[in-house]
Amino acid sequence: MTKKFIILSISALIVGILLILWTLGWFLDKQYKVAEGLAEAKFPYAEYSVEKLKEMFPDYIDRSNITNTQTPEQTHRLFVENLKAGQIDEAVECCFRKGEWGEIKEGLQLVIDDGSFKNMVHDLDTDIVLNVDLGNRRSYDYGIIIDGVNYGSGIDFIKSSDGQWLIESL
């Protein structure tokens, strides 16, 4: 084997691996959009236009142009303040979509029952930092320091039709 053959083989292998990784990333992005109802379920997974979405879903609302009435930071602060005051119902009802209230309240009750509620509130009682902005959805990071080690977590928000940013997941 010549040195030139080895270099070409390694180069071809690297290009092949990069092509596979790019294809996988493209596929996963398309599958996310299909799952969100933003693209066709058949290859090549064409994304729907706003017009097509309005035709398919007459109640579809393009939230990108809706004025903010409550920022994600304000929603986060309101949520934490209600939790600190022990007002679970208010914390959930101010900051989550109505259809999720029961599930969120049950989850918080489990945290209370297992004795980790104060720790959760303490962890959440910090500034949040924007990580990803997708227009109608935003992801924030927050972190706490325990024994000199920084532990981070995330909180996701979705914009409601009235411009209020609600917690989508903790």
Image (tube, rainbow, N blue to C red):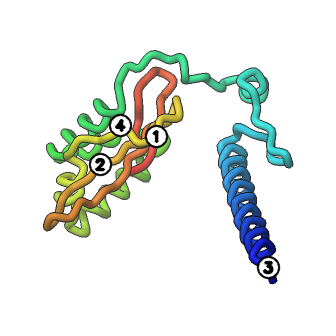
Q: Secondary structure at mark 1?
A: strand
Q: Residue at x 76, y 36 (%)?
A: 47
Query: Based on the displayed image, in which of its 4 quarters is residue 49 positioned?
Result: top right
Residue 75 placement, left or right of 45 = left
Q: Tell me whether the residue at label 2 lies in contact with that at label 3, contact meaning CB atoms closer than 8 angstroms.
A: no
Report, in whole angstroms, how far the alpha carbon at label 4 lies from the one at label 1: 19 Å
State which mark lies toward you, 3 or 1.
3
Question: What residue is shown with label 1?
Answer: 132
Q: What amino acid is found at the position of numbered circle 4 in the picture?
A: Cys
Q: Residue at x 25, y 35 (%)?
A: 78
Question: What residue is shown with label 4?
Answer: 95
Residue 104's place in the image compared with 49, above or below, is below
Q: What amino acid is found at the position of numbered circle 3 in the picture?
A: Thr
Q: Secondary structure at mark 3?
A: loop
Question: What residue is shown with label 2?
Answer: 142
Q: What amino acid is found at the position of numbered circle 1 in the picture?
A: Val
Report, in whole angstroms, how far the alpha carbon at label 3 lies from the one at label 4: 65 Å
Q: Residue 99 appears at what percent x and percent y? A: 49, 41
Question: What residue is shown with label 3?
Answer: 2
Q: Residues within 10 Å of mark 2 (few under 14, many from 20)?
A: some
In primary-sequence order, the first of circles 1 and 2 is 1
Q: Residue 22 appears at what percent x and percent y? A: 70, 54
Front-lying residue, 45 or 149: 149
Front-lying residue, 107 or 156: 156
Q: Residues within 10 Å of mark 4 (few under 14, many from 20)?
A: many
| Mark linked to residue 124 | none
